[in-house]
Image: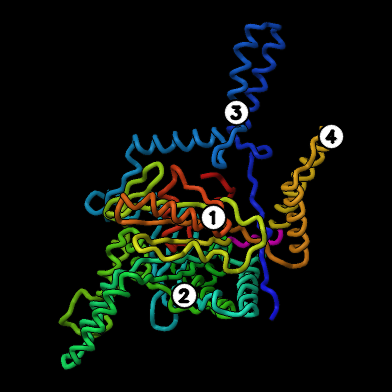
Amino acid sequence: MSAPVTYGGWQSERSGFMGRLSGPGFALVAGGSVLLLVPVNLGSWSAALLCGPTALLFFTLAFGRVQGLSADEWFLLAVRHQIAVASQRNVFMSGVFTPRSRRTGRQPMDLPGTLARLRFLEAPDGLGATVGISYDPSAGTYTAVARVTFPGLALVDTEQQTARVAAWAAFLRSHCTEDSPIVRIAVHQRCLPDNGAALRAWTDRHVAADAPAAAVRALAELMADAGPAAAVRETYLSVTLSAARARLAIKGAGGGQVAAAAVLVREAHALQTGLASAGLNVVAWLGPRALAETVRTAYDPEAQVMLARRAAQAQDQPGDSSAPGLQAGVDPDLAGPAFAETDWGTYRHDGAWTVSYQVRTWPQADVYATFLQPLLRPRPNARRSLSMIYEPVRPRRARQDLARERVKRDSARSLRARTGRSESEDERREASVARAQDVARAAGQGVVRMTAVLAVTVTSASELETACAELQADASAAGLEVRRMWGTQDVGFSTAALPLGQGLPDRRVGF
């Protein structure tokens, strides 16, 4: 048997205004430099005593880093959060409190924060059903979500693991083209504790009246022991289409939102062959009600059992007109929470508390294909969500970005050499990985922007910090460095806990 294949070589994006300095950081450095020149020009010791400490403070704010962020970035986060708190924009209430549209006179779809701009559309899938489409008018994107199953990597041999990972890489690489309308692909997985209520309800309806008492008793004991210890895994794949990139196809389909949704459905069906080769089985492309249900159950974990029971009843009575209100899923207008509040380090929503983390550093050493398994380890009192977000980069832009990064590194190395500073091993490794990545790109490989966002949700505030500590320990076991998304927990929730394909910023910024 061949040796297991290892993977590595992740490159961190750099997006400083000047080097690694942000815009405010560069302004602080410039201001500090001017302050140091003032005493020299004036020839005054009193001015030096005043300007020197102030310049030192500016340099500390610009270059000092705490948990990966500079002091000026922490300051901006804190100011933005306090403004939101003062204006009560961190609190969301739905229902009658939602303002009506002045143009239509109707209440918009109830979603908080950055999700408020989304609209749920529907498009025929060509097979007699409809597909739910999440439309973002600000970004001009359309997202379809599929529920998928995956046989996994842990219990297969090395050859199958390697083949599946290579097929997934080929699937991503197929979208790294100049004319691909797909701008984002996201994989979302949830690990939910199952209290067995839905299983017990289904069993109660299907146990025969003349079943042996001993068998019924044994089944009840089995469910009492195994049900609460079980965990449910849900996996979703979201595909996002850019209306700007697909404008010709949309124009050919008739133009407008309906045509854009039809083009996305066509692209989604074309993806299934590549997904099947990677071992992903598309169970179904979610319709509007099913898509709304995934959003609703993320905001309200207690609704999971009720909706599972209703879905089971709807399956048992598909054509029973005497049992109204049993339609599976959720009305899209009711997808959002009844209440949500964003705090500095937590996000509260409908009786649950969530903390979101962003993966800031991927493993420095080579790892096996199963290295992410600890992140979704079942926990009895907490649900975990993981979103892996991929954005294929066009070849022309990839070439420009990699060339720009290479010039920055070469300039920094040249400056260090002229000033007599030695080069660290980390800097040598980064330069080697960047060179290897550029060689692979020139050989026809694709370049993909990627990040991962994690969320842990509990229904009891007293269990939140314990669940957070467990998640951080599991992330460390996977070789990841994660950081709590201070001040932006609502944005983290919308990315980590919802399979709506929310993506990366144009330029990576800190959280």
What label does residue 148 carry, if any?
2
Left or right of 67, for residue 194: left
Q: Position of residue 315 (x, y in %)?
A: 28, 82
Q: Nearer the viewer, mark 2 or mark 1?
A: 1
Q: Which amino acid type corresponds to the residue marked 4 in the rendered image?
A: Arg
Q: Earlier in the sequence, mark 4 or mark 1?
A: 4
Q: Earlier in the sequence, mark 2 or mark 4?
A: 2
Residue placed under numbered mark 1 in the picture: 476
Taking the magenta stretch, the answer to whether it contains residue 170 is no
- Residue drawn at (26%, 72%), measured in percent from left and top? 197
Q: Which residues are magenta?
A: 391-396
What label does residue 60 carry, if any?
3
Q: Earlier in the sequence, mark 4 or mark 3?
A: 3
Discs 2, 1 touching: Cβ within 8 Å: no
Q: Nearer the viewer, mark 2 or mark 4?
A: 4
Front residue of 495/138: it is 495
Q: Which amino acid type corresponds to the residue marked 2 in the rendered image?
A: Val
Q: Is residue 217 visible?
A: yes
Q: Nearer the viewer, mark 4 or mark 1?
A: 1
Q: Secondary structure at mark 2?
A: strand
Q: Which amino acid type corresponds to the residue marked 1 in the rendered image?
A: Ser
Q: Earlier in the sequence, mark 1 or mark 3?
A: 3
